[in-house]
Image (cartoon, rainbow, N blue to C red):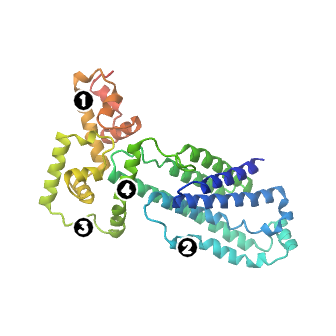
Amino acid sequence: MFYLAGIFITFFLSVLLAGKKGKSEADKILTLWLLVIGFHLITFYLYLSGSYVKFPWFLGLELPLPLVHGPFLFLYTTALTQVRKIKTIGLLHFLPIAVTYILMIPFFLLTFDQKISVYQHNGVGYEWLTSSVFIAIVLSGVSYVILSFLKLRQHKFNIEKQFSNTARINLIWLRYLIYGTSVIWVVVIGGLGDSYIFATVVIYVFFIGYFGVKQVGIFSNAHSDNPKSEKETRLYIDTLQDDLKETTQSFAKPKYQRSSLTDEEAKKIHGQLYKLMVNEKLFKDPDINLGELANKVEVHSNTLSQVINSFENKTFYDYINGLRIDEFKALAADPGNSRYTLLSLAFECGFNSKTAFNRNFKKATGLSPSEYLNKLKINLA
């Protein structure tokens, strides 16, 4: 019953995605991935229940299927973290599974009775194939999990180059998806057996369903009620394209090596930036991003990013949040603000969540906000 529930939920989620209006490339990849997971669970259920003898044409189809999950995870991660469409060359990720099916042609040419006999005798005569496929599965799983984590890490880095607050650009869904896949591969490598592996897969499907429904926009057409969040996402898509191209083209070269910006021009831009921050305190805007700030200074966002990196030795994200922390320190030290709470002052400085404030404050000072206030004997409401 447990496995049947997993099969039902898998196909139900794929139907939800298939019926979603305006599906993105990531939605299409996830839909196809869920269908493959559902089929994989069906083949295992037939094997576990002994019903495979009634459906011998399924035998062998499930053996290479684990090779497909790593590529699906990586392509889904790629589709969610880049603005460019995945090229057809991405299909090469599925080449190992195609090769495996070709190697299995002699098995597929067997009669139904011969196939059943092979299964009943634990793959006798095909030990070399099952051993080779298992090694390939382990290598594929580990490799693609690592590649997905690296892709997500690069995406986070690119976001921090563009935005001062990242809480609204939600990467939790994707991070959990990669973590869940990692757990499955740990069970596979641990050799706990097929029952444990597929039980973990079913739990993973439950997890996808729960968090996917909870995360707005994964399995539905619902949109965020926060217009600023949607504005931020659109600005992100517009500005990140140039940044991704620059990152790719300048691989293995010193940063800004080809920049035509002179030292005098850079100092002038930095001076303008400094005046804006002192006079207008733009960092107090929780939604300020690199593109908007560059428009204020009247330079390209890449140029402003270069100036911040060169003069402040920080990313845009760390630069803005550093100014917010300095502002918080100044406000907290003013006895006139003792009637305010710590969090209200943090929001006044431009932070939009307690978690972001605490994380950035400790990163900058080595102390939590409470520890810092206690050390200086500052009392807030």
The amino acid type found where label 3 is placed reads Gln
Q: Is residue 323 above or below residue 181?
A: above
Q: Position of residue 364 (x, y in %)?
A: 31, 41
Image check: 336 left or right of 263? right
Q: Which residue is mark 3?
A: 257
- Residue 191 or residue 344, whichever sits in front: 344
Residue in the image at 33% along x and 41% along y: 286
Q: Is residue 360 above or below residue 176?
A: above
* Label placed on residue 331: 1
Q: Quadrant of residue 359?
A: top left
The amino acid type found where label 2 is placed reads Leu
The amino acid type found where label 1 is placed reads Leu
Mark 4 vs mark 1, CA separation in Å: 31 Å
The answer to whether the residue labelled 1 contacts the one labelled 3, judged by CB atoms less than 8 Å apart, is no
Whichever of labels 1 and 3 marks the residue nearer the N terminus, that label is 3
Number of residues whose C-alpha sits closer than 10 Å to that of mark 3, classed few (under 14), some (14–19) or many (20 or more): few
Mark 1 vs mark 2, CA separation in Å: 57 Å
Q: Quadrant of residue 54?
A: bottom right
Q: Could you say whether the residue bearing mark 2 is in a helix, strand or loop?
A: helix
The amino acid type found where label 4 is placed reads Asn
Q: Which residue is mark 2?
A: 92
* Label placed on residue 158: 4
The answer to whether the residue labelled 3 contacts the one labelled 4, judged by CB atoms less than 8 Å apart, is no
Mark 2 vs mark 3, CA separation in Å: 34 Å
